[in-house]
Image (cartoon, rainbow, N blue to C red):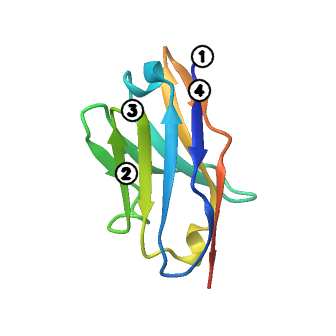
Amino acid sequence: QAQVVESGGGLVQAGGSLRLSCAASRTIFSTNVMGWYRQTPGKQRELVATITTGGTTNYADSVKGRFTISRDNAKNTVYLQMNSLKPEDTAVYYCKGRLFGIDYWGQGTQVTISS
């Protein structure tokens, strides 16, 4: 069954770090780009970072230099290492994969940064 499942959210102080994990079914993980997105109440979901099967990465300007996306092919898992966190990074973070033209989203994980 095609699916993605996030984990690793939580509450940290500004300046701290968190690492999010996204476990995907093999068919999704090995086929296409994987991405992290985030959403706050009343706002549209926005792209945070993506990584291709070949390891090419792309980041939103707001997280460049602070966040790092990576993938472990042996574990079918994508990670988002978040450093120097700011209160404005507070959001629900979602992982997305794509298979045969269908987007597969995880349930989301809450990240809260206190000032």
Question: Could you tell whether 69 is left or right of 38 in the image?
Answer: left
Determine whether the residue tagged by mark 2 lies in a helix, strand or loop: strand
The residue that disc 3 covers is 33
Q: Which residue lies furthest to the front in this view?
A: 74
| Image x and y of residue 3, in percent | 59, 26
Residue 1's disc number: 1
- At x 39%, y 32%, the residue is 33
Q: Looking at the image, which residue is at 54% across and 48% down?
A: 37
Dots 2, 1 in contact, CB < 8 A: no
Mark 2 lies on residue: 69
Q: Position of residue 78 (x, y in %)?
A: 42, 42
SS for callout 4: loop
Residue at the extreme top: 100
Between marks 3 and 2 in the image, the one whose residue lies nearer the viewer: 2
- Mark 2–mark 1 Cα distance, whole angstroms, equals 24 Å
Q: Quadrant of residue 60?
A: bottom left
- Name which of mark 2 and mark 1 comes first in the sequence: 1
Task: Give the spatial CA distance, label 4 vs label 3.
Answer: 14 Å
Front label number (4 vs 3): 4
Residue position for label 4: 3
Q: Label 4 amino acid?
A: Gln
